[in-house]
Image (cartoon, rainbow, N blue to C red):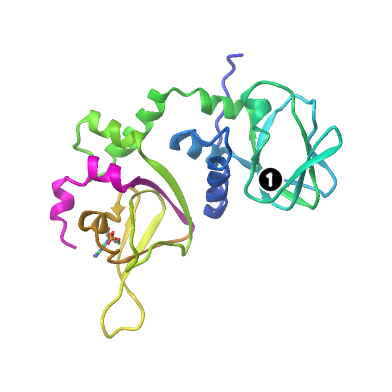
Amino acid sequence: NGAVVEIKHIEKDFRSKQLIKDAILGNDFLKNLDSTQVREIVDCMYEKRIKQGNYIIREGDAGQHVYVSADGELEVLKNNKVLGKMNAGKAFGELAILYNCTRTASVKALSDVCVWVLDRRVFQTIMMKTGLQRQEENIRFLRSVPLLKNLPTDKLARIADCLEVDFFPENDYIIREGETGDTFFIINKGEVKVTQKVTGVDNPVEIRRLTRGDYFGEKSLLSEDRRTANVIALPPGVECLTVDRDHFNALIGDLNELREKDY
Ligand code: PCG
């Protein structure tokens, strides 16, 4: 039916966001979603606690939710026979929703359990957005990135198509000075601190902060060299859109602003 479904974003910490993302990408039926859909699912899931011994899903029921396990131990049963166990970081309950069939197995809490939940209608709304709508959303963001805002739309569209999303809890080292790296980052949410070793000083020294729309990680991709600074997520955490080395080389690496950048 055509009723409008409200897409509500639920605050959560960045460790949980990354757990949900990894669970989705680790599920055979969900792993081909694009980064916009993954981000929407991450933003819309809400938390639910289930006491030990209770069922989260019952075989034969109509499915109303998709889940990601966050904490505790779960058991999967079919005809009262145990099919397996699941720990934190697994997406489940997707089959009845994707294929509009009844639950194919039961899922029971073996301990007190915490799960992330997405309502079927919200999931379907996220899935029904067309590729074009999703691309437009990414292009709109890319136009707000100073580095990219003057690029022609067709080029932005190609960059939009290869973006991935990554979540970093506060204090996480997104980049470590001296390591090799293959990723270019654009900040979508949050703030980072850039620090660097200085000869004669014990601890790396802070050299700047970067925020939404700023980018980093270009230096070692341009020179095929090691990371020249640390980049650390500030509280409450950071959401980055990322581009891998091959796409960076093909679509971004030749921008003059990058080549001429002199920190
Ligand atoms: P890279 O790949 O060397 O990884 C660390 C990143 O920190 C670097 O790319 C830049 O994108 C970013 N950065 C931000 N400010 C500075 C700075 O002043 N000097 C250097 N070397 N890198 C910086």
- Asked if the stretch drawn in magenta spans residue 38, the answer is no
Residue 9 appears in view? no
Indicate whether 7 appears above or below 174.
above
Q: Does residue 29 appear to the left or right of 261 in the view shown? A: right
Indicate whether 26 appears above or below 161.
below
Q: Does residue 175 appear to the left or right of 66 in the view shown? A: left
Tag 1: amino acid:
Val
Which quadrant of the figure shows ligand 1?
bottom left
Q: Quadrant of residue 218?
A: bottom left
> Which quarter of the figure is the N terminus placed in?
top right
What x and y, as percent, mark residue 211?
A: 34, 54
Q: Which residue is mark 1?
A: 115
Q: Nearer the viewer, residue 159 or 44?
A: 159
Q: Nearer the viewer, residue 173 or 7?
A: 173
Q: Does residue 120 appear to the left or right of 176 in the view shown? A: right
What x and y, as percent, mark residue 160?
A: 33, 35
Q: Nearer the viewer, residue 51 or 35?
A: 35
| SS class, disc 1 | strand
Indicate whether 159 appears above or below 177.
above
At a point 24% along the width and 45% down the height, the residue shown is 249
- Asked if the stretch drawn in magenta spans residue 245, the answer is yes
Q: Does residue 66 appear to the left or right of 42 in the view shown? A: right
Residue 211 appears in view? yes
What x and y, as percent, mark residue 178?
A: 32, 68
Q: Quadrant of residue 41?
A: top right
Q: Residues within 10 Å of mark 1 (few under 14, many from 20)?
A: many
At a point 80% along the width and 52% down the height, the residue shown is 111
Magenta highlight range: 236-263
Query: How many numbered discs, if any?
Result: 1
Indicate whether 53 appears above or below 78.
below
Residue reaching furthest bottom? 200
